[in-house]
Image (cartoon, rainbow, N blue to C red):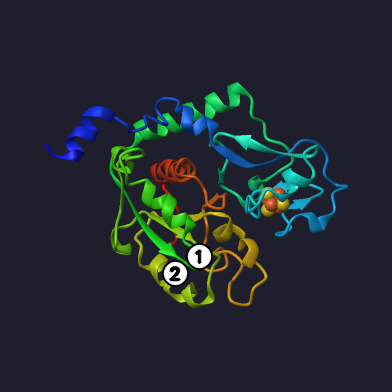
Amino acid sequence: MSIWVLRGLRDGVVTTRWPARPDEYAESWRGPVRALGPVDSVDPDLCPTGAISAQGVDRGRCILCGRCVAERPDLFGWSRGVTGPAALTREQLIIPELPETDAAVAAARAGLAERTRALRRSVHVRHVDAGSDGSEEWEIQALLGPVYDLHRLGVFFTASPRHADVLLVTGAGARGMADPLRTTYEAMPDPRVVIAAGTDAVSGGLLARSEATTGGVITTVPVDIFLAGSPPSPFGILTALLIAVGKLAGGGRETR
Ligand code: SF4
């Protein structure tokens, strides 16, 4: 008997039931940095990407380096769980404090489960690397393994933009990738949804001020969903895709 069969018999089903059921691993995942109180007195040089301002922590700029938590544990801490990393507007990623009550988390989970049930057809995703360091690609690849099993939700990757509903963009927006990215977007049929996946794609991250990048991908393609994290967790990417599914059901972006 093959070793893979023996391993399967030993381990049983490893696929997560999230979001239909809670997942302990997802809830224990280290989330983005949260402000524990007013941070307007913090030295702006503390953060290498300028994510900390008087308004709070901008998740879309935070690269999760941990410097603020290490140097000012009285003002900053890590959040837990996967709810909240993806938002429909860039401003929603700027948070003074996370409203992480049990009721809020349960409501978010129920909403995601409802979206999954509402899916009436498969959704196809075209991924474009616009200057990534490769970390996001590792997490995307994990979605195709037995633990996350993206296909159980009816979501598939496609090589052709002609067949894609969702454009999943990673990377800081390398200038050399601007034209290919735009061409891919224009080749997709309506309705289409664009996800900027990861802090680099949202804001450029550490490379935001580099001449080699456009400081995020929003100046190249219109972004519908902003997903923070450097890299975002597989659960975070799943969350963004499920938001995209909900958006597609509502009509998505019609531009022509
Ligand atoms: S973890 Fe690093 S990048 Fe994020 S807010 Fe703190 S210092 Fe800035």
- Choose top left, top right, bottom left or bottom right for residue 198: bottom right
Quick check: 175 left or right of 158? right
Ligand 1 within 8 Å, label 1 CB: no
Helix, strand or loop for disc 1: loop
* Residue 12 seen: no
**Residue at x-position 39% and y-position 27%:** 20
> Which numbered disc covers residue 181?
2
**Amino acid of disc 2:** Leu
Residue 193 in picture, x, y percent from top left: 44, 53
**Amino acid of disc 1:** Val
Q: Residue 77, relative to residue 53: is it above or below?
A: above
Residue 150 in picture, x, y percent from top left: 33, 42
**Residue at x-position 40% and y-position 43%:** 245
Which residue has dot 1 on it? 221
Helix, strand or loop for disc 2: helix
Quadrant occupied by the N terminus: top left
Quick check: 130 left or right of 78? left
Q: Nearer the viewer, residue 45 or 89?
A: 45
**Residue at x-position 41% and y-position 34%:** 115
Quadrant occupied by the C terminus: bottom left
Q: Residue 136, relative to residue 23: is it above or below?
A: below
Residue 10 in picture, x, y percent from top left: 25, 28
Crowd around label 1: few <14 · some 14–19 · many ≥20 (10 Å)? many
Q: Nearer the viewer, residue 251 or 45?
A: 45
- Disc 1 + disc 2, Cβ < 8 Å: yes
